[in-house]
Amino acid sequence: MKKLLSALLFLASFQVLAADPQIGREFDKTLQIIPTDNPSKIEVTEVFWYGCIHCYQMDPLLNDWVKKLPADVTFRRMPGLPQPTWAPMAKAFYAMEDLKLTDKLHGALFDAVNKEKSLNPTNEAAAIDWITKKSGLDKAKVEASFKSFSMNSKLNQAAQYFRATGATGVPSLIIDGRFITSSTMAGGNPAALKTADYIINNLRADKANAVKK
């Protein structure tokens, strides 16, 4: 009973002022509670797709926002995988991560798909060729990463994560595995980041109050 009351009070704390983001409007609870990597931190996960123009527009704003995050907040990206046609870009994300190419090629891949229009985000063979060319690595090494056993496991996790969030599109921001906001829900990319800040501040206050009790 105490846990239920605490949960209700926590949700109510998000609706104190009408001017603040409102649960059920600018953000909502995730479909399922998703365990985070470090419970002592507030985890923010961006769910995105390289083929999404809104994700492309969000990326520079998000990069600036991440640089200013306080020490108690962690950030990570997760490729969205609601349908098979998104799998090539999810594989590209994980392959770049595996080959230590994310810092070098993440932004360039966004540019290739959305700005230069030189890469079809649903074409796996083209993605392999693109990473090979841009990285200078042997093609066999890139192909091996795309087709590895661990890749299948990561894709399954990405698909499960997307379903658990209840997301209906990208980019979406998942805060602490419990709340979701997006550019669509919040009314634009800047508003989504402001909503994330609001949720983070409330979660921090809730954790502080829990320690005092």
Image (tube, helix red, strand yellow):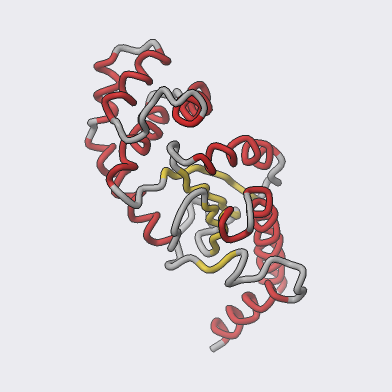
Say left or right for 69 vs 49: right
Front-most of residues 83 and 95: 83
Residue 128 picture quarter: top left
Which residue lies at the image location 24% right of the left edge and 24% below the top edge?
144
* Identity of the residue furthest to the front in this view: 117
Provide residue 139's location: percent of width, then percent of height: 28, 15
Say left or right for 45 vs 187: left
Provide residue 79's location: percent of width, then percent of height: 42, 43
Residue 8 picture quarter: bottom right
Query: If the image is split into quadrants, where does the N terminus sit?
Result: bottom right
Say left or right for 140 vs 101: left
Query: If the image is split into quadrants, where does the C terminus sit?
Result: bottom right
Whether 5 is drawn above or below 65: the answer is below
Which residue lies at the image location 36% right of the left edge and 30% below the top edge?
120
Provide residue 47's location: percent of width, then percent of height: 47, 48
Provide residue 10's location: percent of width, then percent of height: 64, 75
Which residue lies at the image location 31% right of the left edge and 44% below the top edge?
155
Whether 127 is drawn above or below 158: the answer is above
* Identity of the residue furthest to the bottom in this view: 1
